[in-house]
Image: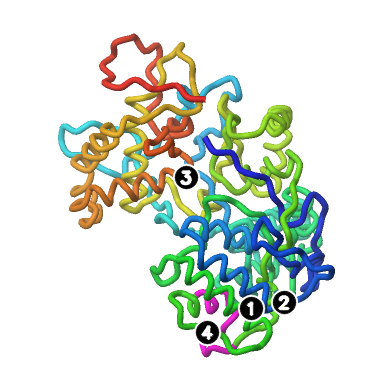
């Protein structure tokens, strides 16, 4: 399984101030990102030549590399966490495997065809569509808190908003939370810098959290248009031009819409140069120690498996499981599910995520049902070694997806284009499971990861040998 290189926007030290400026903001991207050295002094806007160089590198990159390069440069991505916290809170702990631990029970929201198998994994009613967010954490109380408990709730609400939306504007779609960010700006600045090493810039009309590079993230599509290397490049050039109050080319797909969504452009096309400057690329990333590296993974990704960490990071996490669980519960309201294979921070409200799983849409429902079927077939037996992941036979994916489609598709009103094209259905369902870290690529094959078992029926223990499984797992790691 892949290991991520550790890089930060601001190193280990706190690096944020309020008032619209951030220590080091505007520094150029170094060799690791854009191939140019950092400048001697910070600037408000990225110089034209540097923006052009970054745009050239984006335009020449492969699509996946362009996603990572843009994310590394700008850090504009939301946190991503699995939904479906255990109803009675986390049980067991590091001595128990996800393969054989307690699972999430969902009320019946889907009805299989008469006589079909029941997987026990049913999408929650009212959960967000894939890519959607209900956003209760973005609706703060209107009156300032006065008691310590009320102040703690306000601060946590503001921190959750910034974790989900690293750019918040006073008049934007999440503007209801902006007064909370301003009210608690000093505390938020200190906490994000100390806990995650993220600088926070709070201006008169915006707040910008500068997140560190994170593999596997892309800028969300706008107007149903995915970003390409060319459109990323055009966006960088347009942003740099508006920051310098120069005419900007806005005709590339998605550019005008994205700048309008960020409120760098008004609906009438009037630019906001100050906000454009605040969105400048991140300062040069610097290596960080195990604490920040692991905390960033915990805060931003669905699952952290121990075998994906470096030995130093693994030792650090294993020695601080309970303190880190308490820290993230207080800071972001996340609940730590600790298992033998690693840790998942779950949001009991099922809100703090840019992708919803479980969810109500066709893809979310089918993907989770598919994962459950795979777990039922491939879960290690009781008493066997419980690896962090097992190899999925390719034919099993097609068979399991065909089964759940036959049993649930028509009756549950799944999208007819998917029902008519199982190749596309398979591709997109696997992609969602991959982005939620329930499966992982292994060359041209896939690995089923242990956390997927939390959405399957609980293992029947003890499980006798020769119980009819037609596939046996390949132990990895």
Residue at image point 73% right, 38% down: 290
> Badge 2, how many Cα within 10 Å: few under 14, some, many 20+?
many
Residue 110 x, y percent position in the rendering: 28, 44
Cβ atoms at labels 1 and 2 below 8 Å apart: yes
Would you say residue 337 is visible in this rendering? Answer: no
| Residue range corresponding to the magenta coloring | 258-270
Decide which of tag 2 and tag 3 comes sooner along the chain.
2
**Residue 240 numbered tag:** 1
Decide which of tag 4 and tag 1 comes sooner along the chain.
1
Would you say residue 238 is visible in this rendering? Answer: yes
**Residue 45 numbered tag:** 2
Where does label 4 land, which residue?
249
| Residue 265 forms part of the magenta stretch | yes
Inter-mark Cα distance, 4 to 1: 11 Å
Residue 179 x, y percent position in the rendering: 70, 70
Decide which of tag 4 and tag 3 comes sooner along the chain.
4
Residue 451 x, y percent position in the rendering: 48, 33
Q: Secondary structure at mark 1?
A: helix
**Residue 131 numbered tag:** none
Where does label 3 land, which residue?
436
* Residue placed most toward the observer, 457 or 363: 363
Decide which of tag 4 and tag 2 comes sooner along the chain.
2
Q: Is residue 208 above or below residue 205?
A: above
Task: Identify the image quadrant of residue 238.
Answer: bottom right
């Amino acid at each position: 399984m892949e290991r991520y290189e550790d890089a930060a926007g601001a190193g280990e030290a706190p690096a944020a101030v309020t008032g619209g400026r951030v220590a080091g903001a505007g520094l150029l991207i170094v060799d690791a990102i854009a191939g140019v050295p950092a400048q001697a002094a910070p600037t408000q806007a990225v110089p034209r030549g540097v923006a052009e160089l970054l745009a050239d590198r984006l335009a020449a990159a492969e699509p996946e590399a362009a996603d990572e390069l843009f994310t590394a440069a700008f850090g504009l991505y939301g946190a991503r966490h699995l939904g479906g916290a255990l109803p009675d809170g986390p049980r067991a702990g590091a001595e128990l495997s996800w393969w054989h631990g307690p699972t999430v029970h969902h009320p019946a929201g889907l009805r299989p065809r008469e006589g079909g198998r029941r997987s026990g994994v049913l999408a929650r009613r009212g959960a967000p569509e894939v890519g959607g967010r209900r956003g209760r954490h973005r609706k703060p109380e209107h009156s300032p808190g006065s008691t310590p408990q009320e102040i703690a709730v306000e601060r946590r609400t503001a921190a959750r908003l910034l974790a989900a939306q690293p750019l918040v504007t006073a008049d934007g779609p999440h503007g209801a939370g902006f007064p909370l960010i301003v009210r608690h700006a000093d505390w938020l600045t200190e906490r994000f810098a100390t806990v995650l090493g993220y600088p926070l810039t709070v201006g008169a009309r915006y707040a910008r959290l500068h997140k560190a590079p994170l593999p596997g993230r892309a800028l969300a599509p706008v107007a149903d248009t995915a970003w390409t290397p060319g459109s990323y490049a055009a966006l960088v050039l347009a942003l740099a031009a508006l920051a310098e109050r120069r005419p900007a080319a806005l005709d590339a797909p998605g550019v005008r819409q994205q700048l309008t969504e960020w409120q760098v452009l008004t609906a009438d096309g009037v630019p906001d140069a100050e906000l454009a400057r605040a969105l400048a690329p991140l300062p040069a990333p610097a290596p960080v120690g195990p604490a920040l590296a692991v905390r960033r993974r915990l805060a931003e990704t669905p699952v952290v498996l121990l075998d994906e960490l470096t030995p130093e990071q693994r030792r650090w996490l294993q020695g601080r499981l309970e303190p880190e669980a308490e820290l993230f519960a207080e800071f972001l309201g996340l609940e730590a599910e600790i298992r033998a294979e690693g840790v998942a921070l779950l949001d009991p409200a099922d809100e703090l995520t840019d992708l919803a799983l479980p969810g109500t849409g066709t893809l979310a429902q089918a993907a989770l049902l598919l994962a459950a079927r795979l777990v039922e077939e491939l879960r290690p037996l009781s008493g066997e070694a419980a690896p962090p992941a097992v190899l999925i036979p390719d034919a099993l994916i097609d068979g399991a997806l065909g089964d759940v489609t036959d049993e649930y598709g028509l009756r549950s009103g799944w999208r007819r284009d998917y029902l008519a094209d199982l190749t596309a259905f398979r591709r997109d369902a696997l992609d969602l499971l991959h982005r939620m870290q329930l499966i992982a690529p292994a060359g041209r094959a896939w690995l089923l990861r242990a956390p997927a078992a939390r959405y399957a029926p609980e293992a029947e223990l003890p499980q006798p040998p020769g119980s009819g499984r037609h596939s046996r797992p390949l132990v990895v790691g």
